Amino acid sequence: MSRITENLLVKEARGKMGNQFVYKKRGEDTYIAKLPKVDKDAEPTEGQVRVRERFGEASEYAQGAIADPELRAEYERNLPSGKTAYNAAFRDYLKAPVVKSIDAGKYTGVAGTQIVVKTKDDFRVAEVFVSIHTATGELVEEGYAILNPINRNKWTYTTVASNLALAGSSISVTAKDIPGNEGRMMHSL
């Protein structure tokens, strides 16, 4: 693929030229590439079918999201130049949130202690669910964490039950975004 710089003729060019080559934009750069060969008679692979289905689902979600005036306004907020609410919603559907860390340093098994969870999403994490299990797998407690009003990537869960069997216990966290994608992390004590 050839890279073109400082050429006013093709600076903003994109797309197919005849049946020979195609212009592609990557950031500020324009590239010329050989036109890809597509066998229209070939059966799609399982992977291609899954990707096409997922993109179809993302498109349906994005169309529904921009039809809702409140959700559309939320997706439109802080958009980069050239992007639409549809683009933001489409991408949000495809990308799951990530649980970056679980800070259980203050958790001693006593009710009323706080567990801090850091999350990240390309758009917004909608909810964080925390569950605590003993070493034998017995559920101690579970519930939703509260979003920090200043740092929107931090969530705080305040324990409500005592955990007498703290050694070997585990904390499981599930972060969910608006389309329903989930990111998980487990922390052993």
Image: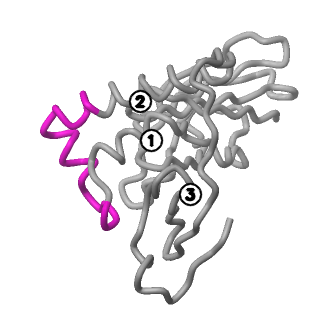
Tell which tag, 3 or 1, sits nearer the viewer.
Answer: 3
Amino acid on which disc 2 is placed: Ala
Distance (Cα) linking label 1 and label 2? 17 Å
Between 52 and 72, which is closer to the camera in this rendering? 52
Quadrant showing the N terminus:
bottom right
Q: Give the percent coordinates (x, y) of residue 6.
A: 51, 89
Between 141 and 14, which is closer to the camera in this rendering? 14
Residue at x 30% of width, y 62% of height: 78
SS of the residue at dot 1? Answer: strand
Distance (Cα) linking label 3 and label 2? 30 Å
- The disc placed on residue 125 is 1
Callout 3 crowding tier (Cα within 10 Å): few <14, some 14–19, many ≥20? some
Q: Give the percent coordinates (x, y) of residue 173.
A: 62, 31
Quarter of the figure with residue 183: top right
Task: Identify the mark nearer the N-term, 3 or 2.
Answer: 3
Location of mark 3 (residue) = 21
Find out whether residue 137 is within the magenta segment: no
SS of the residue at dot 3? Answer: strand
**Above or below: residue 105 compared with residue 172:** below
Residue at x 41% of width, y 69% of height: 13
**Above or below: residue 2 compared with residue 116:** below
**Above or below: residue 12 compared with residue 84:** below
Find out whether residue 79 is within the magenta segment: yes
Segment colored magenta: 63-82
Q: Give the percent coordinates (x, y) of residue 131.
A: 62, 23
Between 23 and 110, which is closer to the camera in this rendering? 23
Amino acid on which disc 3 is placed: Phe
The prevailing secondary structure element of the residues shown in magenta is helix
Location of mark 2 (residue) = 58
Amino acid on which disc 1 is placed: Val
Task: Identify the mark nearer the N-term, 1 or 2.
Answer: 2
**Above or below: residue 144 compared with residue 115:** above
